[in-house]
Every structure is written in structure tokens, then in C-alpha cells.
Amino acid sequence: MKRAIVMYLMVCLLISCKKDKIAQKDTCTVDITHQLRNPYDAAYSTQLNDKQSILQYSKFHLYNAAQYAYLRQNGVFLLDHPFDAVPNKHLQYKTEHTAQYGVYYGVVPNHLPLNGIYTEKLANVLSANSLDNQRVSDENGKDFSGNITFFDPIAATYVPLEGAQIAIKDGTRIIYAFADSLGNFSVQSAAITSDTVEVLLRFDHPNLEIHTIDMSNLLGVMGINTYSLGFRKSCGFTSLNIQIGNSFNNAALHHSCATLLAYNKFKDFAQHFGFLIPNKKMLFWIGKVAPISTSYAAPMLQNMASVSNANTEQLLVQLLGITPDIANLLALVIKNQLPDIYAPYYSFYSTRARRSFLETLFHELSHASQYAQVGPTYWLPYVKYIYTYGGYGNISLPNSGIVAISEAWAEDLHLHILKYLYNQTIYDTYAETPINSWIPYGLYRDLNDDGTTEPFDAVSGITYSEIYTLLQHDMQDVWSLKAKLKLNYPTQQTQIDNLFAHYGY
């Protein structure tokens, strides 16, 4: 009996010892609802005096590895760029290293001896807990998971931002995660071990890239939109909740999110109702402060891949309105990397993207869906028409029939999609009275509705999906559409004639 008790006690002791050796998981919940101040941010601490300060944000000139190691061993997190620097398109930073020394930035306790190390104090930093500066390193790596949402300006609520690429950056080590349809993401890496990381959003996934074109930084259009949310203590984020709303005073970030949201919603609608989307990766240009044109466009140039370098400059001048001297420079840089969709925005709407921006993107995505149906041989004459005549021209011009078919389609379909997605009655009133124009805005809507609200419209029940199947390469003008509809819906031939006559056809 005594032997059994001794064995039992030994087993318990072994179990308790084993538990003591299990490292506590370094986990936490992090909420990002605004631009993060990094843990050592100088912006809020410049008014502190030396007596109030516990830490110093400093710039170092390090002449050898021993100096670097000394700082790291004493809990100093070092970067070779300022903590508030902005990365380039490759998530890399401009450094200040010389042939004699490396330039680094970090935060040190006031009491740490820095004898022999060149130090330039940039700011005093107040820390609520002096232990905040201690390194927390997990040699087995960390798990990062969470959720990202964006404030939808139409729904006036936060919605998941599917396809957002979240980057966790530890110096030169970067890991990526993509948000799913619920906005959830998860990634694990043994490479991320330091106590402080940078969290970034990058607008690039297999279906689209979003770039910004800015007249003050034309070459920036080559880069994929990437935004730093700031630095954070890098406990293994068990719940990294990113919420892009009005607290982010960043117009470029908001409009990038709105562009991705519009694409996601259109893609879901298209897949549900049998509409096509381009099978090649789409390139979006969003124009800062509408520097090029206040008009949106869906030239689908990247998808067509049929624009030669010789006429890139012409497209920039005549389609997007760039002056010839600037277009010449930009053409040399981007070559044929021209946009599928261009959308302008104004930076003075800095806290949010306006609902009109999102709404108009659905119009352009409706064009993109038609392009996926008809192909480049149909679309290129359409694009050339727009930039040759500086807009829609008039009905007497060659290929004006393509304009009439396509512009009315994108306008009517995008209102139909908005009503379906958001169930807001405001979209029933848009284009309620057809415009007296050679572009028959409202025609497709009248083909689809119940035909009881207007005396000229007795056509009903022709769905947008059915109309879409008719928009093939041979659909060159409105008269061709009328003939195809009468053939496919023989019981409504008279009603179709009367409806088209109302629109001037």
C-alpha cells in the first residue's frame, strides 16, 4: 500500500514538473480601429521632459555588430528606418547606412548606459509600464489570426473585407494572410519572433490589383496600394480585429477598401446570376484628387493585352486626359500596364469613401462583365471611339451603336445590382423617367419590370440574365437588340416595338 502511494506521488510530481516546463503561450487580443501609434511613437511624447520620461526614442550610428548586439540584448527593438516611415511597393524602406556605420532607430530605457554608441535623442517616451520595453520572443513562432471589416458607405455598417491581404512584418521578414468571405484570416510563422511588428494592408490578390495614380507622384502608379496600420507589440494575436472606419483619416485607404468591396459584391452577384467576370487579373487605377479625369472608365486595357507600346501615350492623353508631356514620361515607365478600370476620388473626403464612389464602381464593373462576354475584338473599337471623340459623341458616328447598347446596359444593370444587394428603394427612383437621348437609359429596366407603371411599357418578365445572353459580339446597335428580343419573345413582339419606339428606335 505504501509503495502504491509513493508511486502515485512520484507520478504527480512528474506531471507537475512537466507542466512547469510548458511555455506560456504569448497571446493577446488587438483591436485596430485607427492608425496605430507604435509602442514607441514620438508623436504623442515630444512634450515630455526628461523627468517624466521613462524611455527615449533615439537614432543610432552603429559601427560594429557588438554595439548592435548590446542594444538588442538589453531589450531594444531596432529598425533601420524611422518608425513612421512608409514602405515602397515591395514593403521595403529607404535606409541611411554609410560605408562606416549603420543607421538604426529604437527605444531605450533612460537608465541604459550608451557609452561609446552615437545616439541622437529624437523624443522622450512615457511608458505606463517599464516592462513594456522588454522583448517577448517566442522561438517557435507565433500564430496570427483575426478579422477585418470595412464601413460600407451604402449599407452604413461594417462588413467583411474579403480578399484583403494582411501583412505582418518583422524587419525584413514578412508573412501574409488573405481574409476569407467572412473577413477572417489566420497565419502562423516561426519567422516572426520579435516583440514588435508592423501590420500592413496590401491590395493585391489573384483577381485584382489596386494602384493609385497621383499627379504629384506619377511613378507611384507602378506600386500596389499598401498601407501601414502602425506598429504593435507582437504577442501571438489570437484575435487581431481590424476595423477600417471613420477613425482612419486616410482617403487612399478608404477608397482602396471601397474598390475591393465593390469587386467582391459584384463577383458574388455575377456568380449567382450567371454573369461572367474577366478571367484575367484586373488592374484598378484610383486617381487621387481626380488628377486625370473626373470621369470613371472601364477600358479593360490590361485584360485585352492588345494595346501596343506605340499607342500607350495616345491612350493616356485621349482616354484619361493626361497632358502629352506627362503622358510621354508615364508611357515609358508603365509601358502597357494600363488599367482595366479607372476611378477618381477626392482626398478632402478623408474620413470615408462616399457612396457615389462605390455606386459608380458597380457601373464600371457592369461594363467589365459585358467585356467578359463580348471579348476584345468588340471592346477595342468601343474604347477607341471614346478616346477619339472625347466621350459618347453622337448617333451619327461609326460605332455609336456599341456605345448606346453598352452605356445603357451598365447604367441599368448597376442600379438593378444595387437594389438587389442593398434593398434600398432609392434605386427604384434613379432613371425612373427615361432620358430623351440616343443612349436608351432605362430600356433594360423596362424590359425587366412588370410593365404596369408606364403607358409605353407593356413588356415584362425578361430578366437581366436573359438579356445578358443576347449581348454577344454581333450586338452592334439597339436595332439588333430589338430584332433579337422579338425573335426570342414572339408573344411580346408588339409590346417590344412600342417600347423601343418610345426610346427612338
Image: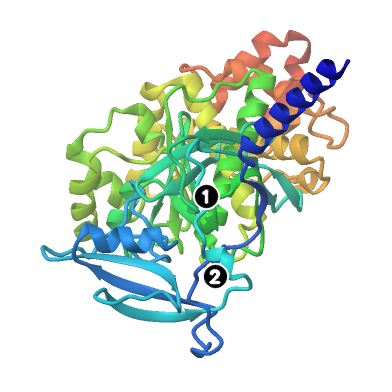
Picture mark count: 2
Q: Which of label 1 and label 2 is nearer to you?
A: 1
- Label 1 neighbour load within 10 Å: few <14, some 14-19, many 20+: many
Rendered view: 219 above or below 18 = below
Which residue is denoted by mark 2 in the rendering? 348
Task: Tell me what residue is drawn at x 33 percent, y 62 percent.
Answer: 70
Q: Where is residue 100 in the image (x, y as percent from the top left)?
A: 12, 66
Q: In which quarter of the image is residue 322?
A: bottom left
Horizontal relation, residue 433 to residue 47: left or right: right
Rendered view: 218 above or below 446 = below
Kind of residue sitting beneath label 1: Ser
Q: Dot 2: what SS? A: loop
251 or 418, which is in the foreground? Answer: 251
Any part of residue 40 in sight: yes
Rendered view: 481 above or below 113 = above
Task: Tell me what residue is drawn at x 23 percent, y 57 percent.
Answer: 65
User: Which quadrant of the rendered structure holds the C terminus?
Assistant: top right
Q: In which quarter of the image is residue 423?
A: top right
Kind of residue sitting beneath label 2: Phe
Q: Where is residue 36 in the image (x, y as percent from the top left)?
A: 57, 63
Which residue is denoted by mark 1 in the rendering? 256
153 or 169, which is in the foreground? Answer: 169
Horizontal relation, residue 251 to residue 222: left or right: right
What colour scheme does the image use? rainbow
Distance from Cα at disc 1 to Cα at disc 2: 15 Å
Rendered view: 61 above or below 397 = below
- Label 2 neighbour load within 10 Å: few <14, some 14-19, many 20+: few
